[in-house]
Amino acid sequence: MTVEKALLGSMLKENFYIGDSIIRPEHFEDRRHQAIFREMRLLHEKGRSVDIITLTTKVDMEPFGGISYLYDLQSYANPKKFDEYEQLLLEQWKEREKRNILTRAKEEDWGIQQVIQTLHLIDEARMDDHFSITTALAEVYEAPWQEGEQTKGIPTGINLLDQMTNGFQAGELTVIAARPSMGKTDVMLHFTKEAGWHGYLPVIFSLEMPYQSLVQRLIASTGGINRIKLRNPFQSLSLEQKEEWTDIIGRVSMTDVQIFDGARQTIAEMRAKTRKLIHQFPEQKPIIMIDYLTLICPKQDYGGNMHLQVSEISRELKMLAKEMNCPVILLAQLNRAVEQRQNKRPLMSDIRESGSVEQDADVIIFLYRDTYYDQASDEKQLELIISKNRNGPVGTVFANYNQFTGRIEDVIH
C-alpha cells in the first residue's frame, strides 16, 4: 500500500497530478484510498485546491483514520517520482486483475485460449491512448475541401534545415552529435532562442555546464560579443556594447528559457520538472533540450554496461517526447574513431553505443567544421549533416558559425 500512499501524497502536494494522471479509483487496492481519490478528483474538477484542509471540510475523515491519516499520506509524497509511482500502481493493479481472471477462469471452466487472450488484454492495457476510428476520420473528413494549415514544427532558424525536417516536431527525438568543441552547445542554444522567440517554452537540462555559463553564452551569441569579454564585462566591453547591453538582455529574456543544471538527473526527474512547467506556462508548448546523453542517470546500473544504460535512456527519451507531446533535442558525444579516418565527417557508428540511439531517434544531425581540423581550410561554415530523418530527406545543411561569440546564422544565398 506504500505506493498508493506515495501517489496520493504527491497529489496533495502538487494538485496538477490529479488531472494529469491516468489512474482511476479502481486501480487502488485500499478502499479508503479509492474514496479519498474520488473526493480529490471532485474538488479538482470544481477548480478548488486540494489539501488537508479542503479535504477534511468536504469529507468525514473519521472512517479513513482521521485528519492524521492525511498527514501520513503527505509524509510519503515525492512528486519527482510521481511517474514511477503511477507505473508501479498500474502494474500492481494488472497483477491483481490477472489473479482475478485466473480465479474466474477456474470457477467458470474457461478454455485455455480464452484465458490467454484475456490475460494478454490486461497485460497490454493502457488507459490514455484510445482513439475511435470514427473520431479520427471525422478530423480529416473535410480535408479535401478545406485549405488547412500545414503542420509545421518549431522553427530552427536555419531555412534549409526547416525545409528538410519541417522544424522540430512534437513527439520526436532529435539527436545532435559531434566531437568536443565542434559547437554542440552553441547549436542547442541557437535552437533554444529561436523556439523561445517563436512563442514556445524551451526547457534545458544542462547536466555538465552550470546555468551561469549558459546565460553568458546566450548573451554573447545574441549580442555578437566575444565570450572572453564576458569574464569581466566592466573592463572588457566597449562603450557601444555597454549601451546595447539592456537591449541584449531584453532579447535574451524574451526567450523564456528554463534551465535545470543539476548533475546526474534521471529522465523521471526531467519528466516531473517539465510537467510542472507545463502547468506554470499553460499557453506555451515546451521543447526539451538535454546536454548530454551519457550524463543522464539511468534507472539501473546494469553492472556498468554502458550499452544497456544508453539503450534504456534512448528508449525513455523517445517515450518522454511522446508523453509530453513535444520535441526532445539530445546532444551526444562521438567516439574517437572519427579522428583515425582521413575523412573526419561523422558516421552513425561514431555515436557512442550507437545502436539503440540510431533506432530510437527520429532525426540524427552530425556537426562538422573543416576548420576544426585544418585552420587554413577554405570551408569556413558549419555543416549540419542530417544522417537520419524519419519523415524527410537526408543531406547536409550549411550555417555560418562564429566560434568566438557562439552566434549561428543562416547562409544567405
Image (tube, rainbow, N blue to C red):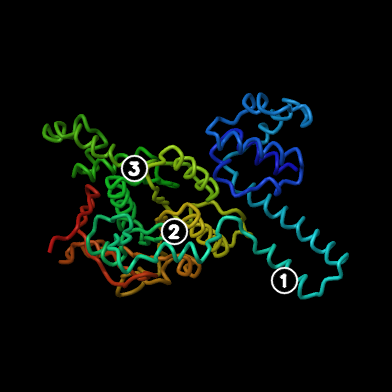
Q: Is residue 254 left or right of residue 388?
A: left
Say which residue label 3 marks. Answer: 214
Q: Secondary structure at mark 3?
A: helix
Q: Amino acid at mark 3?
A: Leu
Residue 401 percent location from the top left of the image: 21, 56
Q: Which mark is residue 171?
A: 2
Within 10 Å of the Cα at label 2, are there few (<14), some (14-19), or many (20+) other Cα atoms?
Answer: many
Residue 142 vs residue 411, the one in the foreground: 142
Question: In which quadrant of the rendered image does the N terminus lie?
Answer: top right
Q: Amino acid at mark 1?
A: Gln
Residue 370 percent location from the top left of the image: 24, 65
Please give the name of the residue rendered at 33% of the width and 58% of the height, measured from the top-left corner. 153
Q: Amino acid at mark 2?
A: Gly
Within 10 Å of the Cα at label 1, are there few (<14), some (14-19), or many (20+) other Cα atoms?
Answer: few
Marks 1 and 2, the one that precedes in the sequence: 1
Q: Which mark is residue 117?
A: 1
Q: Check whether the beta carbons of the residues at disc 1 and disc 3 lie within 8 A of each other.
A: no
Q: Which mark is residue 68?
A: none
Within 10 Å of the Cα at label 3, are there few (<14), some (14-19), or many (20+) other Cα atoms?
Answer: some
Question: In which quadrant of the rendered image does the C terminus lie?
Answer: bottom left
